[in-house]
Image (cartoon, rainbow, N blue to C red):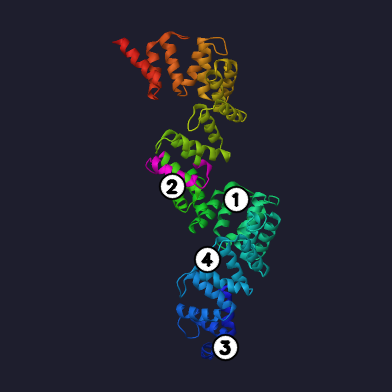
Amino acid sequence: MEESIKDQFLRTYRRESSFLDSIKQKAVLGDENAMYQLGLCYYYGNYGVPKNNKTAFDWFIKAANLGHMIAQYYTGYCFEKSIGVPRDAVQRAKYYGLAAQQGFMNAQYEMGYLYEYGIGIEKDEKKAAEMFQLASDQGHPLAACSLGYFYEKGLGVPINLTKAVEYYQLASDRNDPGGLCNLGYFYEYGIHVEIDFDKARKLYQRAAKQGYARAQCNLAHLYENGKGVPQNYSLAMFYYKKAAKQNYPRAQRCLGILYANGHGVEKNVDKAFALYIKAAEQGDEVAQCNVGYYYDNGISVALDPVKANEWYEKSANQGFAISQYNLAWNLERGIGAKQDYKKAFALYEKAAKQGHASAKFCIAYAYHYGHGVEKDLQKAIVLYKELADQDDAEALCNLGYIYGNDLEADAIDHDLAFTYYEKAAKLGDAVALCNIGDCYEKGNGVTQNYKKAVEYYKMSADQDVDSAQYSLGYCYENGWGVAQDINKAIAYYRKAADHGYEDAIDALKRLDKKDK
C-alpha cells in the first residue's frame, strides 16, 4: 500500500517544478491535502527536502486532525512503527479507526487486526470480522485471507467452512500468499474439499515463490512424505532450508528430523539438536519435546534429566501429548525431579485424552497400584481391557496378574489369568512368559509342570526379565524341572540382583552363608 501511494504521489506531481513551494504555502494556510503532501515529501525525502520522520509526522497529524483520510492512516502507521513519534498502541488504533470510518480499506484491515488481538483497543472478534469484511469487499487480499480464517475457526462469526474456502479462494485469486497456503492446506487434508495433493502443491508453490515460509515448509512436507509427488528428500531439504533461513520454527524442527534420521542427508544428531534448539526457543512444542528427549538420553549433549524435564514441561504446557507422557514418566520415577505420583497421574490423563495409548496404560497402572490416585482395581481392569482389545500385550499381562493375584480370594480366576498371559506372550511380552512359568510351577490354571515352568522362565530370562532370572535360579537351586546346579542358580541370581531384585540379593546372601 505504502509504495502504491508513493508511486501515485510521484506520478501526479513529478512535472511540477514549483510543487514544493506551492504546497508549503497551502499547508501553512491550512490546506489539509497540502499538509498531507508535505508530510509525504519529508517521509520519502523527495523534491529536494531531506527525509525527516519527525517533520513528516507533524504534517501528517495536522492533516489527519482536519479529517484527511490517508493522512489519518499514515498517522496511525507512524504510531505503530515509531516513525517520528514514540510508539503508541492507543493512538495507532485511534487514527487507523478514523481512516477506516472514511472507508479506507487498508485502515479497515488494520482495525480488523487490532480488534482481533486487542491492540490499543478492547479485543472484539466480531468487530474484527466486520472490518475484514469491509476491507475484503474493496479488494484487500490480506483481509480476505483473515476473513477465511475467521470462518474456519469461528472467530467473531459462526464456523462456516464453505465461506472459509470461498474467502481463501478469493485471497488466492488476489495472489495473497497466506490465502494460497491456507487453501492449499485445505486441499492437502481434505477440509471441506476433496483431497487434491496436486492442487495443494501448486498453491503452495505460488506462495513459496513469494518467499512465504509456511508454504515452503508445507511444500517440503509433501516431498518428504511423497504426497501427490514421488518422495524426494532432497527437495524436502531444499524447501525446509528456505523456510528455516527465515527462522520459521516448524521448518527448523522438520529439518532437524531429517538430519536426525539421515533422510536426504548424512545422519547428524548435532545438527539436528542445533535446529531443534532454534525452533524450541521460538516455542515450537514438538521441537521442545525433541530437545527434552536429547537431554533425557544424552544425545549430542550431556545427559541431563533436569533440563529434559524443563523442556518437556514447556512443551507439555502447550498441550503436546508426547511431552506430557515423557514428563509424567520421569516424575513417576523421580528422574530429574522429586518423585511425584499425583502430578504424573494428572499429566498421563492429559496425554490419554489426546489418544496417547501408553499414557492410558499408565493410568490403568496407577489405578492398579494406587500411584497418585486411590487404588481401584475395577477401574484398572476397565482400562486394561480397552487396551487389551487393541492387542496391547502389557495390558493383557497385567489383566492376567490381577485375575491371578490381586482380587479377593473368591474372585481369583487362574484359568482366565493364564488365558491373558498366553495372549500377551503370543504378542511378544517377556513378562507374560515369566508369569506362564509361574502358573506351571504352582499349578495355577494348568496342571503343575516344573519342566514347563523352567522352559518359560528360560525364555523370559533370556529377555532380561529379572523375576524370571530369579525364578530360574530358584529352580536350579532346588532341582525343580532341572538337575540341581548351584552354580547356575548363583549365575541367574546374580543377573536378577544386577537389576536390584531384592529376592535375588537375599538368595545370594543366603548361599554365601552356606558356603562359609
How far, Cα to Cα, is label 4 from label 3?
Answer: 41 Å
- Residue with the mark numbered 1: 222
- Residue with the mark numbered 2: 273
Query: Dot 2, how many residues are within 10 Å of its Cα: few (below 14), some (14-19), or many (20+)?
Result: many
Helix, strand or loop at label 2? It is helix
* Number of the label disc, if any, that sits on residue 15: 3
In the image, what residue occupies the spot 37% across and 13% down? 487
Q: Residue 227 versus residue 168: which sits nearer the camera?
A: 168
In the image, what residue occupies the spot 40% across and 14% down? 489
> In the image, which is nearer the foreground, mark 4 or mark 2?
4
Q: Is residue 97 visible?
A: yes
Which tag, 4 or 3, sits closer to the chain's start?
Answer: 3
Q: Residue 156 versus residue 212: which sits nearer the camera?
A: 156
> In the image, which is nearer the foreground, mark 4 or mark 1?
4
Magenta stretch bounds: 297-323
Helix, strand or loop at label 1? It is helix
Check the image and report above or below for 53 versus 444: below
Query: Dot 4, how many residues are within 10 Å of its Cα: few (below 14), some (14-19), or many (20+)?
Result: some
